[in-house]
Image (spheres, rainbow, N blue to C red):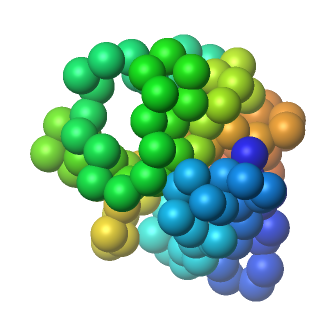
Amino acid sequence: MVKIKIENDKILFEVQGWDKLWSLRNQLEIPLAHINNAYVDTEPAMGWFQGLKLAGTDLPNLFKAGTFYQKGELVFWDVNNPKNTIVVELKHEKFKKLIVEVENPDEEAEKINGSLTKSS
């Protein structure tokens, strides 16, 4: 699971608990200007042959954490419970997307998108 904190002109995505070990990351810091949008995705592609794992852990249809190469792009994953997943689309970053599990997906996506309109 990931906790999201918005501080000034950036967003911190803090990886929680054992997910730090599985994803090989503690946090990601992204400038607000590099975020296109965020949305809820309750059925992310977590099955077999849906991306190449570069660093992290992947148990198809159960758990996905770390850096993956999907459709020609780098994507960061941290998902145990797909029903709590949000996708954050990025620009000018190493990752094209962050696909992460959060406690309240609707609230977190709304919080991110609300911050984008305030910063523009």
Q: Is residue 37 visible?
A: no
Residue drawn at 43 percent across, 21 percent down: 60
The percent position of residue 71, horizontal first and vertical second, equals 18, 37
Left of 6 or right of it: where is 58? Answer: left
Q: Which residue is at the front of the view, 50 or 5?
A: 50
Quadrant that contains the C terminus:
bottom right
95 or 48: which is nearer to us? 48
Percent x, y of residue 96: 34, 55
111 over 91 or under it: above or below: above
Using the rendered image of the protein, determine whether residue 108 is visible from the camera's viewpoint.
yes
**Residue shown at 53%/56% (left/top)?**
23
Residue 64 point in image, percent of width and height: 50, 36
Q: Is residue 51 left or right of residue 99?
A: left
24 w.r.t. 87: above or below? below
Q: Is residue 89 left or right of residue 85?
A: left
Tell me which residue sits at (65%, 78%) in the image: 10
